[in-house]
Image: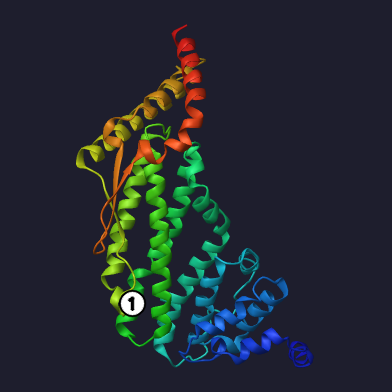
Amino acid sequence: MIQKITKIFKSQSDFTKKLEQCSLTKDNFVFRQEDIDLILQYMIDEKFIKEFFDVYISQEMQTYTIKMKMLIIIHQIINLSEEFSSIFNTIRFHNFNKLKHCNRNNEAWLLQSIQIPFLQYLQKLSINIKDIKSYRTCLFRKQILNTNLVIDSFKLINIVNQALSLVPNLKIALTNYPYDFLLKRTAYNIYLEIHTFQRQLINSLSALLNENSQAKEVEIYEFLKEVQAIEQKMMFFYQFHKKFDPSQTLIPPLKLKIDVESARCIERSAIQEREVCQQLRQAKTKREICSSSPIIDYQLSCERGKKGPQYQHLVLQMNTQGNQAIVWDQQQTFQEGVDTHTDEKAIKEEQNSEYIKK
């Protein structure tokens, strides 16, 4: 009762009035981009961001269409406003699991199969948004410290896989409800985002395959397998893109092509490295490794750094008409970032080599 009285006497801001009057808070399938553009200007202020969520988390706003509109808006603004993302991470959607219209069976399925998983994906995306932006902007600087690049890449892979887990149910929903414009908009935005992430992962993989990389062969091999798995899932996603992209503006997924011999070489190196690591673990448990372990580890890292010529070329192909394959020449692409470290690295390797001989 106190909350209701407080709400009655609480004066609405101009932003709240505009939000409640526009298409974004109406229980229908009308969704105007100009309405999003209108509220975007307010999404840099903490006060208005909290008002935005106050409107959408209220119990009377928990219809299927309004929830979908809220999710689409959040997805669009997350990448634009860090302030919005940080506040979104603190919101508790207590009423989100509730159904406003209990007699609509399709809404119950869509809530459990699409809306809740999509909200969970957005929450994970928002928590990691700073790392994702840093990953995108600092990729070529991180190739030198490639251990961080591997860790950041697998973080992004986890996010991509969570988004791709929505795809099978999206296909079912778009098949059963072909006139649901909000579903189409959601699928379209997800595809665009994952396509961008896929390109970033391929760029990272090409950086790790650089002959100057010190990344472990096991890490590169597992990374390669993950990129190939994402490619297959993206191809499945693209197969039904006409259901949510009638104008066919989306481009096909990127294809990573690496020759069979290179793939086998990476796999063999990864297996050998696993065996060496396993032997080292067994030796340590038997207390057979003492002060010489740092030298052994260094020798292994030197071996990892020596990649054959088959590692030097990656082909990134876009299956669009008129687009030719882009050949990634590692010596040319990453030479600028490596030159500044070559002399220093050579001196250190020579010193370490003399130390090992002694």
Comparing 279 with 125, the one in front is 125
Residue 158: image location, x then y, percent: 44, 55
Q: Pick the quarter of the image with the N terminus.
A: bottom right
Left or right, residue 57 beside residue 336: right
Residue 37: image location, x then y, percent: 57, 79
- Residue depicted at x 67% and y 89%: 17
- Residue depicted at x 49% and y 36%: 144
Q: Amino acid at mark 1?
A: Asp
Residue 165: image location, x then y, percent: 38, 65
Q: Categorize mark 1 by other alpha carbons within 10 Å: few (<14), some (14-19), many (20+).
A: some
- Residue depicted at x 41% and y 24%: 302
- Above-or-below relation of 42 to 149: below
Callout 1 secondary element = loop
Q: Which residue is mark 1?
A: 245
Q: Quadrant of residue 237?
A: bottom left
Left or right, residue 198 beside residue 146: left
Comparing 231 with 3, the one in front is 231
